[in-house]
Amino acid sequence: MAEAKTKPTKASVPAFLAKVKDPALRADCDAVVALMSSVTKAPPVLWGTSIVGFGSYRLQYANGRQGDWPLAAFAPRAKQVVLYVMPGFAGYDELMQALGPVKCGVSCIYVKRLADLDQAALKRLLTRSVAETRKKYPAS
């Protein structure tokens, strides 16, 4: 069975974020670090080569394979920040509407500018996500 490529590293998160070329996007990343650190009570850690994660939990897949993943995470991309909401968005309809205009994947929110989002709704969404993940995976 292949080993996961995305796992915690000892690389410097500030050095990684300093490489974000767009100053506004870099400022958004710094704000997300503060928010996710506050919500998870965990320091930022670089997972793999491009994901900044906070805390961790162990999950087991249907095939029996186990893996670790951050409780909350984000990844800066060329023109946006991708926020990872671990349990996905089922049951979060009201919070997702309150966020403002966003595009979503299965458990990702694609953010062009953090200022476009309702910050209180984002904090509530992340707080619920982390709480539900901790409840589902209590050893995290």
Image (cartoon, rainbow, N blue to C red):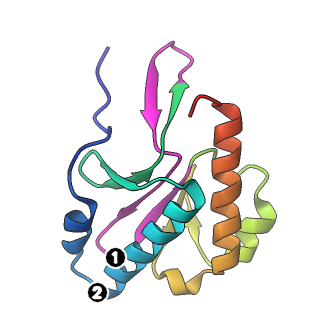
From the viewer's perspective, is residue 135 above or below residue 36?
A: above
Asked if residue 34 lies in the magenta stretch, the reply is no
Cα distance, mark 2 to mark 1?
11 Å
Along the polypeptide, which appears first: circle 2 or circle 1? 2
Asked if residue 82 lies in the magenta stretch, the reply is yes
Q: Amino acid at mark 1?
A: Lys
Quick check: 90 left or right of 2?
Answer: right
Q: Secondary structure at mark 1?
A: loop
Residue 2: give x, y in percent of width and height.
29, 20
First to last magenta residue range? 60-85
Crowd band around label 2 with a 10 angstrom C-alpha radius: few (<14), some (14–19), many (20+): few
How many labels, in total? 2
Q: Quadrant of the C terminus?
A: top right
Quick check: 68 left or right of 5?
Answer: right
Q: Which residue carries the number 1 mark?
A: 79
Q: Amino acid at mark 2?
A: Pro
Identity of the residue drawn at 37% across and 82% down: 27
Identity of the residue drawn at 66% across and 81% down: 118
- Which one is closest to the eye, mark 2 or mark 1? 2
- The residue nearer to you, when weighing 135 against 23, is 135
Residue 126: give x, y in percent of width and height.
63, 60
The disc at residue 23 is: 2
Q: Secondary structure at mark 2?
A: helix
